[in-house]
Amino acid sequence: MTPFQQDSRLRKALKKSALALTVAGGLTMMGCGSNVEYVDEEVMTPTKGVITEVEEVQTNRFLISDETIVETKADSRIIAAYLDGTRDTFTLDEARLVAADSLSGNRRSSASRIVNYGLMGYLMGRSMSTPTTASAYKNSGVYNRVNGQAGATMRNTANRSVVRRPVTRKTGFGGGARSTRSFGG
């Protein structure tokens, strides 16, 4: 057998193997695809903006002292009051940049971290299905007022859409099987 004939046989064998793998992979994918379940999920996107006021209560530790709704996202601001009596105002875009560079440890990054837990967090990318965090606010009165008034306005004016996403289920060892046994009394 010549080297050319050996090479030709090898090519044919490789083509057959590749075809077999492609067919097997396709059948496997078709089998898996029929078991995929989907869930519809409502996604809310804010249409209004927020002015968030934060207060430095200890060095580089801030709490939200107020949040008010404004007509447009472009009007959103963070107003920071520092312990040394200075004030700083930055836009939503500036807050996003500062948050992206949050390792810098400067005063702005400390102030921008806390706003993620309030209404401003929705404008910075947090899901509106995640509630605000009470501990991010100066006190429970501020938290209740903001979430009762500004929070309700933000939720009521948000754009709503439904997104269909696949449900992930664990299968195999440690997943998928459910016990029908009941223990206890």
Image: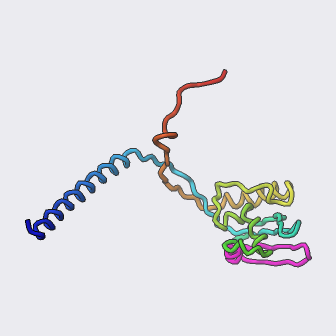
Q: Does the magenta run of residues contain 42?
A: no
The image quadrant where one finds the C terminus is top right
Q: Which residues are magenta?
A: 76-98
Residue at 69 percent across and 61 percent down: it is 154
Residue at 84 percent across and 64 percent down: it is 65
Residue ranking furthest to the top? 185
Colour logic: rainbow
In the depicted structure, whether residue 94 falls above or below residue 36: below
Q: Residue 174's spot in the image, x, y percent?
A: 52, 40
Residue ranking furthest to the left? 1
Q: Residue 89's spot in the image, x, y percent?
A: 79, 78
- Could you say which quadrant of the image residue 97 lies in? bottom right
Residue at 73 percent across and 58 percent down: it is 151
Residue nearer the viewer, 110 or 81: 110
**In this image, 142 relative to 164: left or right?**
right
- Could you say which quadrant of the image residue 146 lies in? bottom right
Q: Residue 163's spot in the image, x, y percent?
A: 51, 56
Residue at 73 percent across and 70 percent down: it is 70
Residue 74 visible? The answer is no
Residue 14 visible? The answer is yes
In the depicted structure, whether residue 47 falls above or below residue 39: below
- Could you say which quadrant of the image residue 48 lies in? bottom right
**In this image, 84 relative to 147: left or right?**
right
Q: Does the magenta run of residues contain 89?
A: yes
Q: Residue 12's spot in the image, x, y percent?
A: 16, 62
Residue nearer the viewer, 182 or 158: 182
